[in-house]
Protein backbone atom coordinates (compact mmCIF):
# COMPACT_ATOMS: atom_id res chain seq x y z
CA UNK A 1 0.00 0.00 0.00
CA UNK A 2 1.33 3.42 -0.96
CA UNK A 3 0.54 6.54 1.09
CA UNK A 4 0.74 10.06 -0.32
CA UNK A 5 0.17 13.48 1.23
CA UNK A 6 -1.49 16.17 -0.92
CA UNK A 7 -3.03 19.60 -0.79
CA UNK A 8 -6.71 18.77 -1.21
CA UNK A 9 -9.49 21.05 -0.04
CA UNK A 10 -13.09 19.93 -0.43
CA UNK A 11 -13.52 21.65 -3.79
CA UNK A 12 -10.46 19.86 -5.19
CA UNK A 13 -11.45 16.61 -3.46
CA UNK A 14 -14.75 16.57 -5.35
CA UNK A 15 -12.83 16.27 -8.61
CA UNK A 16 -10.07 14.00 -7.32
CA UNK A 17 -9.62 10.68 -9.14
CA UNK A 18 -10.11 7.99 -6.50
CA UNK A 19 -12.43 5.04 -5.95
CA UNK A 20 -13.60 6.25 -2.55
CA UNK A 21 -13.45 9.61 -0.79
CA UNK A 22 -13.65 9.92 3.00
CA UNK A 23 -14.24 13.33 4.58
CA UNK A 24 -13.58 13.65 8.31
CA UNK A 25 -15.85 16.21 9.96
CA UNK A 26 -15.23 17.65 13.43
CA UNK A 27 -18.26 19.16 15.14
CA UNK A 28 -16.90 22.70 14.67
CA UNK A 29 -16.48 22.33 10.88
CA UNK A 30 -18.18 25.11 8.91
CA UNK A 31 -19.20 24.00 5.38
CA UNK A 32 -18.49 26.24 2.40
CA UNK A 33 -20.27 26.42 -0.96
CA UNK A 34 -18.55 23.57 -2.82
CA UNK A 35 -20.42 20.38 -3.82
CA UNK A 36 -19.28 18.34 -0.80
CA UNK A 37 -20.02 21.17 1.64
CA UNK A 38 -23.56 21.45 0.30
CA UNK A 39 -24.04 17.72 0.91
CA UNK A 40 -22.73 18.12 4.47
CA UNK A 41 -25.13 21.01 5.11
CA UNK A 42 -28.10 18.99 3.85
CA UNK A 43 -27.08 15.89 5.81
CA UNK A 44 -26.81 17.84 9.03
CA UNK A 45 -30.09 19.68 8.41
CA UNK A 46 -31.93 16.40 7.81
CA UNK A 47 -30.32 14.75 10.87
CA UNK A 48 -28.63 12.17 8.63
CA UNK A 49 -25.26 13.06 10.17
CA UNK A 50 -24.70 14.05 13.77
CA UNK A 51 -21.53 14.74 15.76
CA UNK A 52 -21.17 11.29 17.35
CA UNK A 53 -17.67 9.89 16.79
CA UNK A 54 -17.79 7.38 13.95
CA UNK A 55 -21.28 8.37 12.77
CA UNK A 56 -21.15 8.15 8.99
CA UNK A 57 -23.14 8.72 5.87
CA UNK A 58 -22.25 6.81 2.70
CA UNK A 59 -23.31 8.27 -0.64
CA UNK A 60 -22.98 6.46 -3.95
CA UNK A 61 -22.30 8.63 -7.00
CA UNK A 62 -22.90 11.89 -5.16
CA UNK A 63 -23.69 14.88 -7.37
CA UNK A 64 -20.56 16.83 -8.25
CA UNK A 65 -18.19 14.22 -6.80
CA UNK A 66 -15.94 12.18 -9.09
CA UNK A 67 -15.33 9.33 -6.62
CA UNK A 68 -17.99 6.65 -6.95
CA UNK A 69 -18.32 6.45 -3.17
CA UNK A 70 -18.30 9.34 -0.72
CA UNK A 71 -18.25 8.75 3.04
CA UNK A 72 -18.88 11.63 5.43
CA UNK A 73 -17.87 10.71 8.97
CA UNK A 74 -17.99 12.65 12.22
CA UNK A 75 -14.96 12.98 14.48
CA UNK A 76 -16.70 14.68 17.41
CA UNK A 77 -14.37 17.22 19.03
CA UNK A 78 -11.65 16.12 16.58
CA UNK A 79 -9.07 14.58 18.92
CA UNK A 80 -6.51 12.21 17.43
CA UNK A 81 -8.23 9.29 19.14
CA UNK A 82 -11.61 10.31 17.69
CA UNK A 83 -10.07 10.75 14.24
CA UNK A 84 -8.63 7.26 14.44
CA UNK A 85 -11.98 5.77 15.47
CA UNK A 86 -13.86 7.64 12.73
CA UNK A 87 -11.36 6.75 10.01
CA UNK A 88 -11.47 3.08 10.97
CA UNK A 89 -15.26 3.13 10.79
CA UNK A 90 -15.23 4.73 7.34
CA UNK A 91 -12.64 2.34 5.88
CA UNK A 92 -14.51 -0.59 7.41
CA UNK A 93 -17.71 0.56 5.73
CA UNK A 94 -15.93 0.64 2.37
CA UNK A 95 -14.46 -2.86 2.59
CA UNK A 96 -17.34 -4.58 0.85
CA UNK A 97 -16.90 -2.23 -2.13
CA UNK A 98 -13.26 -3.33 -2.43
CA UNK A 99 -11.81 0.05 -3.48
CA UNK A 100 -8.25 0.06 -4.80
CA UNK A 101 -7.69 3.75 -4.00
CA UNK A 102 -8.98 5.87 -1.11
CA UNK A 103 -8.57 9.56 -0.32
CA UNK A 104 -9.10 10.86 3.22
CA UNK A 105 -9.64 14.59 3.70
CA UNK A 106 -9.03 16.40 6.99
CA UNK A 107 -10.44 19.94 7.01
CA UNK A 108 -8.13 20.84 9.91
CA UNK A 109 -5.21 18.44 10.02
CA UNK A 110 -2.57 18.37 12.75
CA UNK A 111 0.43 16.09 13.18
CA UNK A 112 -1.48 13.92 15.65
CA UNK A 113 -4.56 13.68 13.43
CA UNK A 114 -2.56 12.82 10.32
CA UNK A 115 -0.70 10.16 12.29
CA UNK A 116 -4.05 8.79 13.48
CA UNK A 117 -5.47 8.66 9.93
CA UNK A 118 -2.50 6.72 8.55
CA UNK A 119 -2.59 4.28 11.47
CA UNK A 120 -6.33 3.73 11.14
CA UNK A 121 -6.34 3.22 7.37
CA UNK A 122 -3.37 0.82 7.52
CA UNK A 123 -4.97 -1.18 10.32
CA UNK A 124 -8.50 -1.30 8.90
CA UNK A 125 -7.35 -2.25 5.39
CA UNK A 126 -4.73 -4.86 6.37
CA UNK A 127 -5.14 -8.22 4.63
CA UNK A 128 -3.13 -11.38 5.34
CA UNK A 129 -2.26 -13.10 2.07
CA UNK A 130 0.71 -15.40 2.75
CA UNK A 131 -1.37 -18.56 3.02
CA UNK A 132 -4.56 -17.06 1.58
CA UNK A 133 -3.65 -15.85 -1.93
CA UNK A 134 -7.28 -15.29 -2.81
CA UNK A 135 -7.25 -12.33 -0.41
CA UNK A 136 -4.83 -10.44 -2.67
CA UNK A 137 -7.79 -9.23 -4.73
CA UNK A 138 -8.88 -7.02 -1.83
CA UNK A 139 -5.54 -5.28 -1.30
CA UNK A 140 -5.69 -1.49 -1.18
CA UNK A 141 -3.10 0.06 -3.51
CA UNK A 142 -3.07 3.80 -2.79
CA UNK A 143 -4.14 6.03 0.10
CA UNK A 144 -4.13 9.81 -0.31
CA UNK A 145 -4.26 11.98 2.80
CA UNK A 146 -5.52 15.43 1.89
CA UNK A 147 -5.24 18.73 3.78
CA UNK A 148 -6.81 22.01 2.65
CA UNK A 149 -3.65 24.14 2.25
CA UNK A 150 -0.01 23.73 1.26
CA UNK A 151 1.00 25.26 4.60
CA UNK A 152 -0.84 22.55 6.52
CA UNK A 153 0.73 19.87 4.34
CA UNK A 154 4.20 21.26 5.05
CA UNK A 155 3.51 21.36 8.80
CA UNK A 156 2.65 17.67 9.03
CA UNK A 157 5.19 16.14 6.62
CA UNK A 158 7.42 14.85 9.41
CA UNK A 159 4.53 13.21 11.24
CA UNK A 160 3.27 11.72 7.97
CA UNK A 161 6.70 10.21 7.22
CA UNK A 162 6.87 8.69 10.71
CA UNK A 163 3.32 7.37 10.44
CA UNK A 164 3.90 5.68 7.08
CA UNK A 165 7.14 4.08 8.34
CA UNK A 166 5.25 2.86 11.38
CA UNK A 167 2.55 1.42 9.14
CA UNK A 168 5.23 -0.58 7.31
CA UNK A 169 6.62 -1.87 10.60
CA UNK A 170 3.23 -2.82 11.99
CA UNK A 171 2.37 -4.63 8.74
CA UNK A 172 5.56 -6.70 8.99
CA UNK A 173 4.85 -7.54 12.64
CA UNK A 174 1.30 -8.60 11.69
CA UNK A 175 2.63 -10.67 8.80
CA UNK A 176 4.87 -12.78 11.02
CA UNK A 177 2.44 -12.89 13.90
CA UNK A 178 -0.31 -14.21 11.63
CA UNK A 179 1.75 -16.85 9.85
CA UNK A 180 0.86 -20.44 10.77
CA UNK A 181 3.63 -22.13 12.74
CA UNK A 182 4.66 -24.27 9.76
CA UNK A 183 5.23 -21.04 7.83
CA UNK A 184 7.05 -19.29 10.68
CA UNK A 185 9.62 -21.69 12.10
CA UNK A 186 12.66 -20.33 13.96
CA UNK A 187 14.70 -20.80 10.78
CA UNK A 188 12.16 -18.84 8.73
CA UNK A 189 12.05 -16.08 11.33
CA UNK A 190 15.83 -15.85 11.14
CA UNK A 191 15.63 -15.52 7.36
CA UNK A 192 13.18 -12.65 7.78
CA UNK A 193 15.70 -10.91 10.04
CA UNK A 194 18.45 -11.53 7.50
CA UNK A 195 16.21 -9.95 4.89
CA UNK A 196 16.06 -6.79 6.99
CA UNK A 197 19.87 -6.68 6.92
CA UNK A 198 19.68 -5.86 3.21
CA UNK A 199 18.40 -2.43 4.24
CA UNK A 200 20.63 0.52 5.05
CA UNK A 201 22.33 0.57 8.48
CA UNK A 202 21.03 -2.87 9.55
CA UNK A 203 23.17 -5.93 10.19
CA UNK A 204 22.11 -9.38 11.29
CA UNK A 205 23.81 -12.33 12.95
CA UNK A 206 22.07 -15.67 13.47
CA UNK A 207 23.34 -18.17 16.05
CA UNK A 208 22.35 -21.84 16.05
CA UNK A 209 22.32 -24.59 18.70
CA UNK A 210 26.11 -25.00 18.82
CA UNK A 211 26.77 -21.30 19.33
CA UNK A 212 24.01 -21.06 21.94
CA UNK A 213 25.47 -24.02 23.82
CA UNK A 214 28.94 -22.45 23.70
CA UNK A 215 27.50 -19.25 25.21
CA UNK A 216 26.09 -21.27 28.11
CA UNK A 217 22.44 -20.48 27.35
CA UNK A 218 21.23 -23.61 29.08
CA UNK A 219 17.81 -22.21 29.89
CA UNK A 220 17.03 -21.25 26.27
CA UNK A 221 18.41 -24.54 24.93
CA UNK A 222 16.32 -26.55 27.40
CA UNK A 223 13.07 -25.12 26.04
CA UNK A 224 14.08 -25.93 22.46
CA UNK A 225 15.20 -29.50 23.12
CA UNK A 226 11.71 -30.98 22.76
CA UNK A 227 11.34 -29.88 19.14
CA UNK A 228 12.85 -31.18 15.93
CA UNK A 229 13.00 -27.56 14.72
CA UNK A 230 16.41 -26.11 15.66
CA UNK A 231 16.51 -22.96 17.77
CA UNK A 232 17.86 -19.68 16.46
CA UNK A 233 19.26 -16.69 18.35
CA UNK A 234 18.89 -13.59 16.17
CA UNK A 235 21.01 -10.49 16.75
CA UNK A 236 20.03 -7.36 14.81
CA UNK A 237 21.96 -4.08 14.80
CA UNK A 238 20.65 -0.74 13.59
CA UNK A 239 23.53 1.77 13.61
CA UNK A 240 22.41 5.33 12.98
CA UNK A 241 24.74 7.09 15.44
CA UNK A 242 28.41 6.88 16.32
CA UNK A 243 29.52 3.51 17.64
CA UNK A 244 30.34 5.17 20.96
CA UNK A 245 26.64 5.94 21.51
CA UNK A 246 25.12 3.31 23.80
CA UNK A 247 22.30 1.36 22.10
CA UNK A 248 18.82 0.58 23.27
CA UNK A 249 18.34 -3.19 23.26
CA UNK A 250 14.98 -4.73 22.34
CA UNK A 251 14.47 -8.37 23.34
CA UNK A 252 11.55 -10.16 21.68
CA UNK A 253 10.14 -13.50 22.79
CA UNK A 254 10.09 -15.79 19.75
CA UNK A 255 8.24 -18.98 20.66
CA UNK A 256 6.97 -19.82 17.19
CA UNK A 257 4.53 -22.37 18.61
CA UNK A 258 3.74 -23.06 22.25
CA UNK A 259 2.06 -26.33 23.14
CA UNK A 260 3.00 -25.79 26.76
CA UNK A 261 5.48 -28.68 26.50
CA UNK A 262 4.94 -31.49 28.99
CA UNK A 263 2.67 -29.08 30.93
CA UNK A 264 0.38 -29.31 27.91
CA UNK A 265 -2.12 -26.55 27.20
CA UNK A 266 -5.84 -27.31 26.70
CA UNK A 267 -6.72 -28.16 23.10
CA UNK A 268 -9.39 -25.50 22.41
CA UNK A 269 -7.77 -22.33 21.11
CA UNK A 270 -4.30 -23.87 20.95
CA UNK A 271 -3.99 -22.76 17.32
CA UNK A 272 -3.59 -19.23 18.68
CA UNK A 273 -0.30 -20.23 20.24
CA UNK A 274 1.28 -19.39 16.89
CA UNK A 275 0.99 -15.82 18.22
CA UNK A 276 3.48 -16.56 21.00
CA UNK A 277 6.23 -15.02 18.88
CA UNK A 278 4.54 -11.61 18.60
CA UNK A 279 7.24 -10.09 20.80
CA UNK A 280 9.81 -11.19 18.24
CA UNK A 281 7.56 -9.93 15.43
CA UNK A 282 7.38 -6.52 17.09
CA UNK A 283 11.18 -6.30 17.11
CA UNK A 284 11.27 -7.11 13.37
CA UNK A 285 8.57 -4.53 12.73
CA UNK A 286 10.44 -1.87 14.70
CA UNK A 287 13.60 -2.48 12.67
CA UNK A 288 11.57 -2.22 9.47
CA UNK A 289 10.38 1.23 10.58
CA UNK A 290 13.89 2.27 11.64
CA UNK A 291 15.21 1.35 8.22
CA UNK A 292 12.62 3.63 6.61
CA UNK A 293 13.26 6.58 8.93
CA UNK A 294 17.05 6.29 9.45
CA UNK A 295 17.12 8.08 12.84
CA UNK A 296 20.43 8.99 14.52
CA UNK A 297 20.28 6.27 17.18
CA UNK A 298 21.70 2.82 17.82
CA UNK A 299 19.41 -0.13 18.47
CA UNK A 300 20.11 -3.81 19.05
CA UNK A 301 17.41 -6.43 18.59
CA UNK A 302 17.72 -9.83 20.28
CA UNK A 303 15.31 -12.63 19.38
CA UNK A 304 15.60 -16.03 21.05
CA UNK A 305 13.32 -18.23 18.97
CA UNK A 306 12.28 -21.88 19.19
CA UNK A 307 9.24 -24.12 19.56
CA UNK A 308 7.94 -25.45 22.88
CA UNK A 309 6.91 -29.05 22.16
CA UNK A 310 6.21 -32.25 24.13
CA UNK A 311 8.44 -35.19 23.22
CA UNK A 312 10.73 -37.78 24.78
CA UNK A 313 13.45 -35.12 24.74
CA UNK A 314 11.34 -32.34 26.19
CA UNK A 315 12.04 -30.42 29.36
CA UNK A 316 10.15 -31.96 32.31
CA UNK A 317 8.53 -30.38 35.36
CA UNK A 318 11.09 -30.51 38.17
CA UNK A 319 14.13 -30.34 35.88
CA UNK A 320 16.85 -27.89 36.86
CA UNK A 321 18.63 -25.93 34.14
CA UNK A 322 21.57 -23.52 34.25
CA UNK A 323 21.10 -20.13 32.67
CA UNK A 324 23.78 -18.08 30.90
CA UNK A 325 24.07 -15.96 34.05
CA UNK A 326 25.08 -19.07 36.03
CA UNK A 327 21.86 -19.03 38.05
CA UNK A 328 20.09 -22.38 38.23
CA UNK A 329 16.34 -22.59 37.57
CA UNK A 330 13.88 -25.22 38.76
CA UNK A 331 11.29 -25.65 36.03
CA UNK A 332 8.03 -26.26 37.86
CA UNK A 333 5.91 -25.62 34.78
CA UNK A 334 7.16 -26.09 31.22
CA UNK A 335 4.41 -23.76 29.97
CA UNK A 336 6.26 -20.88 31.64
CA UNK A 337 8.88 -21.16 28.91
CA UNK A 338 8.97 -17.59 27.66
CA UNK A 339 10.86 -16.37 30.71
CA UNK A 340 13.31 -19.24 30.27
CA UNK A 341 14.40 -18.06 26.84
CA UNK A 342 14.24 -14.36 27.72
CA UNK A 343 16.48 -14.65 30.76
CA UNK A 344 19.42 -15.84 28.66
CA UNK A 345 18.81 -13.08 26.10
CA UNK A 346 18.79 -10.50 28.91
CA UNK A 347 22.13 -11.78 30.14
CA UNK A 348 23.49 -11.60 26.58
CA UNK A 349 22.28 -7.97 26.33
CA UNK A 350 24.78 -6.87 28.98
CA UNK A 351 27.68 -7.08 26.48
CA UNK A 352 26.32 -4.10 24.55
CA UNK A 353 26.59 -1.76 27.57
CA UNK A 354 23.07 -0.56 26.77
CA UNK A 355 21.43 2.70 27.72
CA UNK A 356 18.27 0.63 28.30
CA UNK A 357 16.91 -2.86 27.67
CA UNK A 358 13.24 -3.52 26.91
CA UNK A 359 11.89 -7.04 26.58
CA UNK A 360 8.61 -7.66 24.81
CA UNK A 361 6.72 -10.89 25.37
CA UNK A 362 3.32 -12.57 25.23
CA UNK A 363 4.22 -13.79 28.69
CA UNK A 364 1.23 -14.37 30.97
CA UNK A 365 -2.50 -14.95 30.84
CA UNK A 366 -2.54 -13.20 34.20
CA UNK A 367 -1.73 -9.92 32.46
CA UNK A 368 -4.80 -10.37 30.25
CA UNK A 369 -6.92 -10.83 33.38
CA UNK A 370 -5.40 -7.65 34.87
CA UNK A 371 -5.54 -5.32 31.89
CA UNK A 372 -7.67 -7.00 29.25
CA UNK A 373 -6.83 -6.31 25.62
CA UNK A 374 -6.48 -2.53 25.79
CA UNK A 375 -3.13 -1.90 27.47
CA UNK A 376 0.12 -3.86 27.61
CA UNK A 377 1.56 -4.50 31.05
CA UNK A 378 4.64 -2.42 31.83
CA UNK A 379 7.15 -3.35 34.53
CA UNK A 380 10.31 -1.41 35.36
CA UNK A 381 12.27 -0.47 38.46
CA UNK A 382 13.25 2.76 36.65
CA UNK A 383 10.74 5.60 37.00
CA UNK A 384 12.36 7.51 34.13
CA UNK A 385 12.23 4.56 31.72
CA UNK A 386 8.68 3.66 32.73
CA UNK A 387 7.50 7.25 32.27
CA UNK A 388 9.15 7.49 28.84
CA UNK A 389 7.45 4.28 27.70
CA UNK A 390 4.07 5.38 29.08
CA UNK A 391 4.40 8.69 27.21
CA UNK A 392 5.37 6.91 23.98
CA UNK A 393 2.31 4.70 24.37
CA UNK A 394 0.02 7.71 24.72
CA UNK A 395 1.56 9.46 21.70
CA UNK A 396 1.26 6.38 19.50
CA UNK A 397 -2.12 5.27 20.93
CA UNK A 398 -0.39 1.96 21.68
CA UNK A 399 -1.14 2.01 25.38
CA UNK A 400 0.56 0.39 28.35
CA UNK A 401 0.09 0.53 32.13
CA UNK A 402 2.71 0.24 34.84
CA UNK A 403 2.36 -2.61 37.33
CA UNK A 404 4.33 -3.11 40.57
CA UNK A 405 7.62 -4.89 41.21
CA UNK A 406 7.60 -5.05 45.02
CA UNK A 407 10.26 -7.41 46.31
CA UNK A 408 7.70 -9.38 48.29
CA UNK A 409 6.34 -10.76 45.00
CA UNK A 410 9.58 -12.72 44.55
CA UNK A 411 8.95 -14.86 47.63
CA UNK A 412 6.97 -17.41 45.63
CA UNK A 413 9.92 -18.00 43.28
CA UNK A 414 12.10 -19.53 45.98
CA UNK A 415 13.20 -23.12 45.38
CA UNK A 416 14.69 -25.87 47.56
CA UNK A 417 16.57 -27.26 44.56
CA UNK A 418 17.78 -24.28 42.53
CA UNK A 419 18.54 -20.57 42.79
CA UNK A 420 15.04 -19.74 41.57
CA UNK A 421 11.84 -21.45 40.38
CA UNK A 422 10.35 -20.45 37.06
CA UNK A 423 6.85 -19.94 38.48
CA UNK A 424 5.23 -18.88 41.73
CA UNK A 425 1.55 -19.36 42.61
CA UNK A 426 -1.45 -18.16 40.62
CA UNK A 427 -1.75 -14.87 42.48
CA UNK A 428 -0.09 -11.93 40.75
CA UNK A 429 1.19 -14.14 37.95
CA UNK A 430 2.16 -11.28 35.64
CA UNK A 431 4.13 -9.63 38.44
CA UNK A 432 5.95 -12.78 39.56
CA UNK A 433 6.93 -13.47 35.93
CA UNK A 434 8.40 -9.97 35.75
CA UNK A 435 10.18 -10.54 39.07
CA UNK A 436 11.78 -13.65 37.58
CA UNK A 437 13.10 -11.64 34.62
CA UNK A 438 14.30 -8.83 36.86
CA UNK A 439 16.88 -11.19 38.39
CA UNK A 440 18.65 -11.24 35.03
CA UNK A 441 18.41 -7.50 34.31
CA UNK A 442 20.15 -5.84 37.25
CA UNK A 443 23.10 -4.45 35.29
CA UNK A 444 21.20 -1.93 33.16
CA UNK A 445 17.98 0.11 33.05
CA UNK A 446 15.31 -2.43 32.17
CA UNK A 447 11.63 -2.61 31.31
CA UNK A 448 9.38 -5.55 30.54
CA UNK A 449 6.29 -5.29 28.33
CA UNK A 450 3.80 -8.11 28.76
CA UNK A 451 1.76 -7.98 25.54
CA UNK A 452 -0.29 -11.15 26.05
CA UNK A 453 -3.54 -9.18 25.87
CA UNK A 454 -2.50 -6.69 23.19
CA UNK A 455 -0.63 -8.77 20.62
CA UNK A 456 -3.58 -10.41 18.90
CA UNK A 457 -7.35 -10.48 18.65
CA UNK A 458 -9.46 -13.59 18.85
CA UNK A 459 -12.90 -14.55 17.56
CA UNK A 460 -14.16 -13.22 14.20
CA UNK A 461 -11.39 -10.58 14.17
CA UNK A 462 -8.67 -13.16 14.91
CA UNK A 463 -5.25 -11.87 13.95
CA UNK A 464 -2.09 -10.13 15.12
CA UNK A 465 -2.33 -6.43 15.99
CA UNK A 466 1.29 -5.49 15.34
CA UNK A 467 1.56 -4.03 18.83
CA UNK A 468 3.66 -2.65 20.43
CA UNK A 469 5.63 -1.47 17.37
CA UNK A 470 4.06 1.98 17.71
CA UNK A 471 5.04 2.33 21.35
CA UNK A 472 8.59 1.10 20.71
CA UNK A 473 9.18 3.33 17.69
CA UNK A 474 7.92 6.47 19.40
CA UNK A 475 10.07 5.70 22.43
CA UNK A 476 13.17 5.14 20.29
CA UNK A 477 12.69 8.31 18.26
CA UNK A 478 12.75 10.29 21.50
CA UNK A 479 16.22 8.89 22.32
CA UNK A 480 17.97 10.47 19.31
CA UNK A 481 21.51 11.51 20.18
Image (cartoon, rainbow, N blue to C red):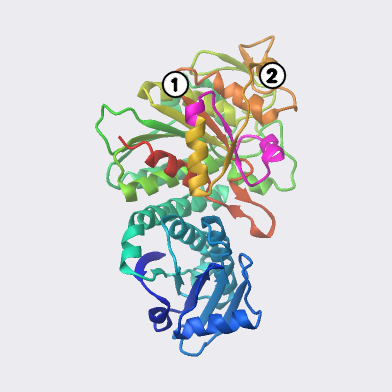
Q: Position of residue 135 (x, y in %)?
A: 53, 68
Residue 304 visible in image: no
Please state which of the two labelled residues, at mark 2 or mark 1, is closer to the viewer. 1
Residue depicted at 35% across the width and 30% down the height: 247
Q: Residues within 10 Å of mark 1 (few under 14, many from 20)?
A: some
Q: Quadrant of residue 75?
A: bottom right
Tell me the residue that label 1 is attached to: 444
Extreme residue toward the bottom, this view: 63
Residues in magenta, as a range: 362-385
Residue depicted at 51% across the width and 26% down the height: 383
Label 2 residue SS: loop
Q: Position of residue 86 (x, y in %)?
A: 57, 65
Tell me the residue that label 2 is attached to: 318
Tally the numbered discs.
2
Image quarter where the C terminus lies is top left
The span from disc 2 to disc 1 (Cα, nearest Å) is: 31 Å
Q: Is residue 98 in the magenta section?
A: no
Amino acid sequence: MNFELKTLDLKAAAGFNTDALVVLLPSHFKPGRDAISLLITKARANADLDDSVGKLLSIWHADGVKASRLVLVSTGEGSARSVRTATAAAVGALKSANPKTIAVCLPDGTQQRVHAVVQAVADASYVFTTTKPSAKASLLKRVTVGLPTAEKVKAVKGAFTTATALAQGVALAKEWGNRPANHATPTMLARAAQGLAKKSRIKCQVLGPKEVEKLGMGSFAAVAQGSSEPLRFIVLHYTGAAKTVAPTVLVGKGITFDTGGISLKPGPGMDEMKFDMCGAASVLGTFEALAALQPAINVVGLIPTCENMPSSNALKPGDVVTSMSGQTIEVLNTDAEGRLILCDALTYAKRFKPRAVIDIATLTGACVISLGHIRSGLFSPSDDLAQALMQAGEESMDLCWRLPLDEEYAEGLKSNFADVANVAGRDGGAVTAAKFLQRFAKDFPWAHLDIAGAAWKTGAAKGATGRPVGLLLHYLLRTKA
